[in-house]
Amino acid sequence: MKPSLEIKQEPSLNMEHRLDKIEEKIDRLTDAMVSIARAEEKLAHMETQQSNHYDRMNKFSEKLDSIEEQVRDNATTVNLINKLFWVAIVAASGAIAAQIWM
């Protein structure tokens, strides 16, 4: 009778062993899915950061364009003031020369 008991126990042990293997594989699949989910979260975060950086670069570009326009306006004003300064210097020199020689 002992041999028959061992034969009956062997399929149940074999089934338990197979179930343990299946359970291990399911655990590994769960770990893999968690890793994939974490990677997707990191990618989404990186994409958000890239979008934010792109927006900031666009704002900096707009500010730079505005500053460039102001510099151009200021350069025109400075050139005008420079010309007026030299006209005033020449007029003053002419007046001084006219006073000295007349």
Image (tube, helix red, strand yellow):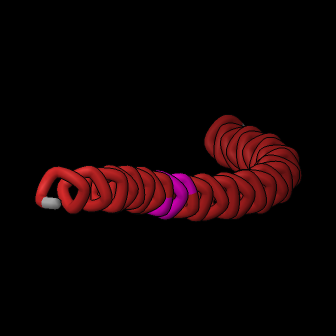
Q: Quarter-wise, where is residue 60 in the image?
A: bottom right
How many badges with numbers are in the image? 0
Magenta-drawn segment: 30-36
Q: Is residue 20 above or below residue 21?
A: below
Percent x, y of residue 35? 45, 56
Query: Looking at the image, which is closer to me, 44 or 83?
Result: 44
Image quadrant containing the C terminus: top right
Residue drawn at x 62%, y 42% as measured from the top left:
100
The answer to whether any part of residue 44 appears in the image is yes
Answer with left or right where residue 12 lies relative to residue 26: left
Percent x, y of residue 86? 73, 41
Answer with left or right where residue 40 lies relative to residue 29: right
Percent x, y of residue 94? 75, 39
The answer to whether any part of residue 31 appears in the image is no
Residue drawn at x 61%, y 56% as measured from the top left:
40
Q: Is residue 69 above or below residue 12?
A: above
Query: Looking at the image, which is closer to me, 28 or 10?
Result: 10
Residue drawn at x 39%, y 56% as measured from the top left:
15
Residue at the left extreme?
Answer: 2
Query: Looking at the magenta stretch, what is its main secondary structure?
Result: helix
Image quadrant containing the N terminus: bottom left
Residue drawn at x 54%, y 53% as measured from the top left:
36
Query: Looking at the image, which is closer to me, 28 or 17?
Result: 17
Asked if the stretch drawn in magenta spans residue 34, the answer is yes
Asked if the stretch drawn in magenta spans residue 92, the answer is no
Q: Is residue 83 above or below residue 85?
A: above
Query: Looking at the image, which is closer to me, 52 or 24?
Result: 24
